[in-house]
Image (spheres, grey):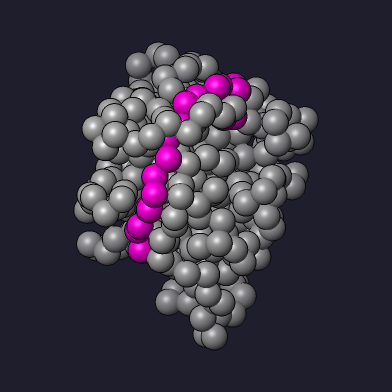
Amino acid sequence: MASRTHRLPSERIKRFIRTGILETDMVTRRLLMAAAGSIALNPLRALAQQGSFESEAMHRGRATVPVFLNGEGPYQFMVDTAATASLISSDLAKRLQLPPAGAIGMHTLVGREVVPTVRVARMNTGALNAPDVVLAVGSRAAISGLDGLLGCDLLADRKVILNLNGTERVRIARSTAPPRSFRPGITPGIPVVIAGERRLGSLLAVPSQVGRSPVVAIIDSGAEGTILNRAAALAGRAMPLTPGDGQSIRRVQSPTGQVTWGQAMLLPSLRLVGGVDVSNLAVAVGDFHSFRIWGLDNQPAVLIGMDILRRFKSVHIDLKRSELSLHI
């Protein structure tokens, strides 16, 4: 069946273009972008409206879960499937009088940073019940006022479920097989299950392409916007994008407040295996440190952020099975 292209209402596109890319504090890959253009699905329907993404489980566009530390809480932690280290805000660590656990080197998009850590005797949220947890200490301001961040060091054997339709919540679940009703292709009510691979430890990468070129696409529930390295921008023929405020260079901030910069660009096409296409996507492009550490500085690579994931009714990110389930 031929593909159909579903376009956002013209007034909405005009508002996106007029508003441009909004600036916000960012954690590792945090970048808030307004997406303009069309969403193409093969064969049936658009992923979802681009509208409000606020619910009890969302904070400024971030997916969050309630976390208990040493039996106290709940505290609101961001769920970040592309972060290699979990983190707690410095003020909360001080208030809970968590004992220090030495310093670690933490790699972010900004660079390698040496940060202090603290030890938590017990951490609980959903299906995650972890003893003796070591958390990096970061800045609350750099994580949008949240209490902390859950990374792949704690999520590697779990599934992250993002229920983005109605009032359902984000939760951490046990890894499970796809439903038996699964079949390839895009059909409303039947999830698109994409078999990926574990890269760089516990990160989930799924087969994708920009333009006609294959690209390493890492699923990043902690990034509000999608981010490309320069190799992917070149392969996908991304074009410079000047938002309404005239500022085409955007700030990228690490959990400790360190800053680097990315260029706002428009990516004509991004395709995930299974026939899921996103066209005319606003992205940030740069020679970021994480891509170099991952050995992807010269290979097309992309961090798929919440600007894409939030267009589905629900998203299951199974890090143990290396599977991504998209529910239309």
**Residue 229 percent location from the top left of the image:** 65, 30
Left or right of 304 on screen, residue 167: left
**Residue 39 percent location from the top left of the image:** 47, 51
Quadrant holding the N terminus = bottom right
Quadrant holding the C terminus = bottom left
* Residue 178 picture quarter: bottom right
Report the span colored magenta: 106-126
**Residue 43 percent location from the top left of the image:** 54, 68
What residue is drawn where x is 27% and y is 64%?
168
* Residue 10 picture quarter: top left
* Front one among 291 and 257: 257
What residue is drawn where x is 74% and y is 47%?
214
The answer to whether residue 167 is visible is yes
The answer to whether residue 248 is visible is no
* Residue 26 picture quarter: top left
Marks counted in the figure total: 0
What residue is drawn where x is 42% and y is 77%?
189
Tell me which secondary structure the magenta stretch mostly adopts: strand
What residue is drawn where x is 35% and y is 16%?
245
